[in-house]
Amino acid sequence: MDLETLQNDATALQSQLDDLAVKHYTSFLSHTSSTRKLTAALDEFPESISSATSKINSLSSTLSSSKSELSALSSSHSSSRSSISDLPPLLTLLESPQLIDLLIRTNKYSQAVQVSKHVLSLPATSVIEKLQNSILHGPYFPTLIKSIVSHLQTIPHSTSSTPPPPPP
């Protein structure tokens, strides 16, 4: 092959390349654009992963703190539930000193003793035990005993149908 043939082949190839470039110019531009977008997305990918990781860590810490808050709330709920279950005996205890006082003032000693026995028979919790002790060692129980003793001393031994006089 001689030099002239090689030059003609080179010119023909250049012409074919130019024709192909013009013919497929839009495809070339779209491929170039897609390649640039893909390269940019790949460059941003580590930042996106880092951002997602920080969001996951933040959510994890929020979840952890929410768990502890829920645990505290559950404990509080259990405590409230036990307090509510103690409410009927507690109400009985809170009303009993006034009831005992009223029974003593109206000379109904046996009923006052029954109320005292009932208070002492209630199921024990720390609050109920404190109230039971305040009733036993408070002003009403000794007053009840003194009133009963003084009343018994004033009752004649005969069986009369007249009511006993009120205590002093």
Image (cartoon, rainbow, N blue to C red):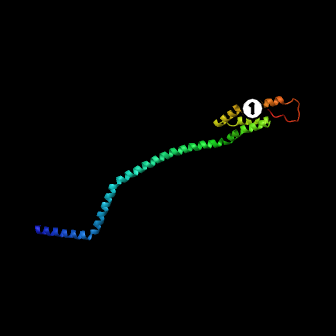
The correct choice, above or below, for 9 with respect to 105 in the image is below
Res. 30 visible in picture: yes
Name the quadrant of the N terminus. bottom left
Residue 38 lies left or right of residue 21; in this view the side is right
The residue identified by callout 1 is: 143
Question: Crowding at label 1, few (<14), some or many (≥20) Cα neighbours within 10 Å?
Answer: some
Q: Position of residue 151 (x, y in %)?
A: 81, 31
Location of the C terminus by quadrant is: top right
Depth check: give the residue in front, 102 or 36. 102
Which percent across, then down, holds residue 121?
A: 71, 35
Residue type at mark 1 is Thr
Q: Is residue 69 above or below residue 116?
A: below
Question: Residue at left 29%, top 68%?
Answer: 26
Between residue 91 and residue 76, name the one nearer to us. Answer: 91
In this picture, residue 150 sits left or right of residue 72: right
- Residue 146, quarter of the rendered image: top right
In the rendered image, is residue 2 in sight?
no
